[in-house]
Image: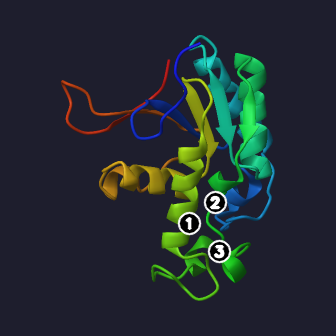
Amino acid sequence: MGPAFEFESTPFYFLRHGETPENQAGVLQGQTDTTLTPSGRRTAEEAGRLLADRELGSIYASTLKRAWTTASIVSVMTRAPRFPLPGLMERHWGDYEGKPKSERPEERDPEGVETMDAFSARVLHAMDSIDGPPPVLVVAHSGVFRVLGRYLGFSVEDTTSISSADLVYFEPPSQSRARWHISAVSL
């Protein structure tokens, strides 16, 4: 077995959880524990098929049902062990959870909401705690994707959106590339 995963220097896969009824309705989920739609389960299976021949070493996932179920589906299809990582949960949006996304305040840290600094620190601490064998798959949420992207030097435009069950690959700088690189994984 090779070396353990090191967040700031090891490439990794990132998969956003499959679709939920709340995604369909445009509702802010945050840390509300929601489940996958039948379509969300199917797209998780598609991601599992994409990863099945890539010999994943380990899967680390948010403990929220939508992400954990997605990780479980991929784990069965890839035979990679999965590990719960609560630090990968979505940002806590307080009283805004369960309401239309259009009602989410524009300000960075509205009252009663997990601050962006606390959320970012929690996510980065979780990533630093991953010690399983690579290649690692992280299964989490759009907010987690944005935190990772910004921390690794991507622009806001590059990390604004990731759709349900989108699978991407983060590659660290190399001799031929001075910055991190994100690429979509597809057939």
Residue depth check, mark 2 versus mark 1: number of the one nearer the observer: 1
* Mark seen at residue 93: 3
Could you tell whether 163 is left or right of 36 in the image? left
Q: Secondary structure at mark 2?
A: loop
Q: Position of residue 184 (x, y in %)?
A: 43, 31
Q: Amino acid at mark 2?
A: Glu
* Residue 48 in the figure: left or right of residue 184: right
Question: Residue drawn at (34%, 50%), measured in percent from left and top?
Answer: 158
For marks 3 and 1, the one nearer the N-term is 3
What residue is rendered at 43% in x and 30% in y? 11
Q: Residue at x 57, y 29 (%)?
A: 136
Pinpoint residue 30: horizontal percent, then vertical percent: 67, 65
**SS at mark 3?**
loop
Amino acid type shown at disc 3: Trp
**Residue 86 place in picture, x, y as percent:** 71, 53
Q: Are marks 2 and 3 in contact (CB under 8 Å)?
A: no
Q: Which mark is residue 90?
A: 2
Contact flag, marks 2 and 1 (Cβ < 8 Å) = no
What whole-number distance in Å separates the C-alpha atoms at marks 2 and 1? 8 Å
Between marks 3 and 1 in the image, the one whose residue lies nearer the viewer: 1
Q: Nearer the viewer, residue 173 or 37?
A: 173
The residue indicated by pointer 1 is 119
Q: CA distance from mark 2 to mark 3?
A: 9 Å
Query: Local crowd at mark 3 within 10 Å, few (<14), some, or many (≥20)?
Result: many
